[in-house]
Amino acid sequence: MIQRPRGTRDFLPDEMEFRRNTEIKMREAARRWGYREVCTPTFETQELYTIRSGEGIINEMYTFEDKGGRALALRPEGTAAVLRMYVNEAKMLAKPLRWCYLSDCYRYERPQKGRYRQFWQFGAELIGADTAEGDAEAILLADDILRAAGVNYDLHVGHLSPMRAILRDVPEDRKRTIMALLDKKNIEGLEETLDSWHLEDLESSLKGLLEADTTDDVFAITGPIPEQERIESMINVLENEGTVFRQNYGIVRGLDYYTGMVFEGFAENLGAENQIIGGGAYRLAHLFGGDDVGSCGFGIGFDRVMVSLGEVPVPEDIVVAVLYTKEACEYAFSLSRQFRDAGFRTEINLLDRGIGAQMKHAAKKAHYAVIAGEREMAGGTVTLRNLTTGNQKECGVAEAIHGVSREWQ
Ligand code: HAM
């Protein structure tokens, strides 16, 4: 038996329906904020992702050479391709641009619950609104989308500037190591590393930053920094909107392109892989040949949303099975069409079997059986059976459709 590749999944119809219904709620929330859907190719040149995505992503990329010898990669995340598209196709459009997408992404990670090699991201990018209000909008939108989907989660909002201010005199490569330790809240590792580089004097500021959860705390540690007003304004908008969040200036993010505001969300039911969303402000367009436009956005782990929502619900669709004797075949097709036209999921018998066997099958899959035999065909009627109660009656087609509509008992 051929198995699917490790880290991929198959989705049966009930689960797929649940995914689509959730997707619809998320898209609708995005639509109300003016975010319109875009789509980029599943594969791009490798270079697009190696320019600024950071080592984590580069090491996990699915790369390949096509028959023409081009170095390509499957999309590991949505942002780089969307910004490439902006530079190629849309840089003349009036900004800000509000775009969203639901894209499959590929990362060669160790699979576990909530972590896959093929997964979907519901993302949004706000291009050309490099302001506190733009930062706030990205967070508010993400919060609205997750709540519309029905996810319970904790929202953490931060900014890279305070940490960078504390680390301003540290060489770039060491800065990265320290920031990675802070991101993982690895205090022991942080202490050891700072000691070994004779940077002990930064220890209390960095630890203080991890604990700071108000802007006052943060700026008491860093002193005045140029981004102070922007951070405060963004936090004010979020607070005025009644957003439930905590400030967390220890957020670093795994991708290298972030420049300012950063945020993450952690959901229940997910175990170790509980980060359901990540995002922030960044600059990428200039690296792809465009203008240096400030942008921000986020990626919601759509599969993690689904894991967090839990059990796949029983689909709500009413299912009508159309059963018939040989002579009434064409009549049955026409009845099926009428039930479909009325909006019902209608499945006609396709196999060579008697009414008894058709009924047995219908009882497993449908809520109503519409039976068409010679008598019904001659009279232009149907026999309608409620498969839950066993109630049955012969009536006109319109009455049967009406009966199913109001769940005739
Ligand atoms: P990211 O944090 O790498 O950010 O991914 C966003 C979300 O995708 C994560 O929070 C997680 O929920 C989900 N995710 C990541 N890897 C996997 C996986 N292997 N399996 C299942 N879900 C996963 C980005 O990708 C940025 N492009 C977000 C962004 C958009 N920043 C600005 N704009």
Image (cartoon, grey):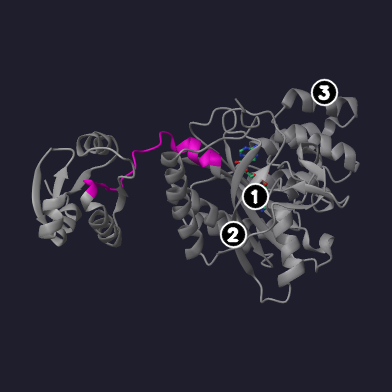
Label 2: few (<14), some (14–19) or many (≥20) C-alpha neighbours in 10 Å: many
Label 3 CB sits under 8 Å from any ligand 1 atom: no
Work out which quarter of the rendered image holds the N terminus and state it.
Answer: top right
Real-space CA distance between mark 2 and mark 3, rounded to the nearest whole angstrom: 42 Å
Report whether the residue tagged 1 is closer than 8 Å to ligand 1. Answer: yes
Where is residue 263? Give x, y as percent. Answer: 63, 47
The disc at residue 279 is 1
Give the magenta part as a residue range: 303-326
Q: Are marks 2 and 3 in contact (CB under 8 Å)?
A: no
Identify which residue, 170 or 264, lies in the foreground: 264
Quarter of the image holding residue 61?
A: top right
At x 75% / y 36%, what residue is drawn?
206
Residue 181 in the image, given as x and y percentages of width and height: 76, 32
User: Mark 2 against mark 3, which lies toward the viewer?
Assistant: 2
Proximity of marks 1 and 3: CB atoms separated by less than 8 Å:
no
Among the 4 quarters of the image, the one containing residue 212: top right
Percent coordinates x, y for residue 69 in the rendering: 88, 50
The reply to whether discs 1 and 2 touch (Cβ–Cβ < 8 Å) is no
Residue behind mark 2: 100
Residue 192, labelled with which disc?
Answer: 3
Mark 1 and mark 3: span between their CA atoms? 30 Å
Secondary structure beneath label 3: helix
